[in-house]
Amino acid sequence: MSKHTPEPWSTSTDPTLIFSEYEGRNLVTARARGPDEEKPHNAQRIVACVNALAGVEDPADFLRKVCANVVDAQRGTDRYEDRCPFCWADHGETHIDECVVHECEAYLKGRDS
Ligand SMILES: [Zn+2]
């Protein structure tokens, strides 16, 4: 992974700008792009993703492995025979949006498509 500006990153009074601290000063690291109404949300998402994976060398590889392990571990439990142990969805039901298994399955599916 290439060298990048250290975390934490943040937004500021201009919600489309992304900042990081460098030698005691806040510097603009990036500017969010997209439709005007989406720019602040794009900036918040970039900051959240970068900060959540601070210190992880290869975020995409890390997430793929974590999600694969979560799905495998959940399927390996006795409780999975009846319901998802995280959100109690029956097999064939949709996991609640906040279910970690749902998130992991969606992440893995998105990477494969
Ligand atoms: Zn679930």
Image (cartoon, rainbow, N blue to C red):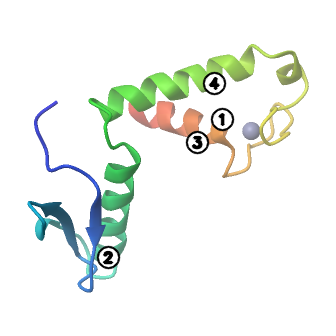
Q: Would you identify the image quadrant in which residue 72 lies?
A: top right
- Whether the residues at callouts 1 and 3 have beta carbons within 8 Å, the answer is yes
Query: Pointer 4 and pointer 3: residues touching (CB < 8 Å)?
Result: no
Give amino acid for label 2.
Pro
Q: How much space separates mark 3 and mark 2, taking CA atoms?
A: 23 Å
* Left or right placement of residue 89 versus residue 25 in this view: right
Q: Give the spatial CA distance, label 1 vs label 4.
A: 6 Å
* Mark drawn on residue 40: 2
Amino acid type at image mark 3: Glu
- Residue at screen point 44% across, 37% down: 110
Taking 109 as reference, is 60 left or right? left
Dots 1 and 4: beta carbons under 8 Å? yes
The disc at residue 71 is 4
Please state the horizontal and vertical placement of residue 36, each as a whole percent of the image. Answer: 26, 81
Query: Is the residue marked by circle 4 packed among few (<14), some (14-19), or many (20+) residues within 10 Å?
Result: some
Kindly state the secondary structure of the residue where label 4 is placed.
Answer: helix
Disc 2 beta carbon < 8 A from ligand 1?
Answer: no
